[in-house]
Amino acid sequence: MSVERGVGELRSFHVKRRYRGAMVRVLITGMSGVGKSSLLEVLGEWGHFVIDTDYGDWKTSAGIWDARRMDEALAGHESVVVSGTAENQGQFYDRFDHVVLLSAPEEVIIERVQNRSTNPYGSSEEERAEIRGYLRSVEPLLRRGATVEIDATRPLIDIAREIVRLTNAERST
């Protein structure tokens, strides 16, 4: 399935569910290369309010989320999907209905970061070594804080559908 066809299928899936009510707050987290930004792009195309904390001024110069800015965004939106990974993200977990960890095997992540054109991180051997280290040191911490873990080797359409199912299930409880 081509990406264009997959996104078209995702749009069709979304249109059927678009007006069922407000989406809940979801944090999508995981290592670089698991597909967080790609997933957010699809959800944004569906009309969901999304925040990709890897871009813009969501992080301070220390690389942590700007707490004031994140507080304002979460207070101002009942329906939001936030994506990113930062050392201080745990202080916001209680404001999300779901904390979703996207995970993939090391070899998949390394191949993705080497070949992507949308983000230069991971293009050097030093950065790939850093990613390997984070898989051992940071990903287990993310896993402990997650409410759901999704295999990011699955097709993007399936992952997006699962996020929609999570939000629909949360609204019905």
Image: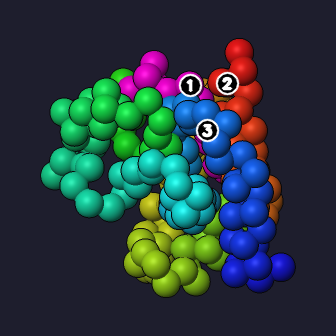
Q: Is residue 65 left or right of residue 122?
A: left
The residues tagged by marks 3 and 1 sit, at their Cα atoms, a distance apart of: 10 Å
Residue 12, percent from left and from top: 75, 63
The number of numbered discs placed on residues in the rendered structure image is: 3
Residue 24 horizontal/vertical position (percent): 55, 31
Per the image, the residue denoted by label 1 is: 97
Q: Secondary structure at mark 2?
A: helix
Observer-nearest of 154 and 106: 154
Q: Nearer the viewer, residue 5 or 55?
A: 5
Q: Disc 1 on helix, strand or loop?
A: loop
* Mark 2 surroundings: few (<14), some (14-19) or many (≥20) residues within 10 A: some
Give the labeled residue for mark 2. 170
The kind of residue tagged 2 is: Glu
- Label 2 – label 1 distance at C-alpha: 8 Å
Rendered residue at 50%/69% (across/down): 128
Which span of residues is magenta-colored? 92-105
Tell me what residue is drawn at x 70 percent, y 54 percent: 14
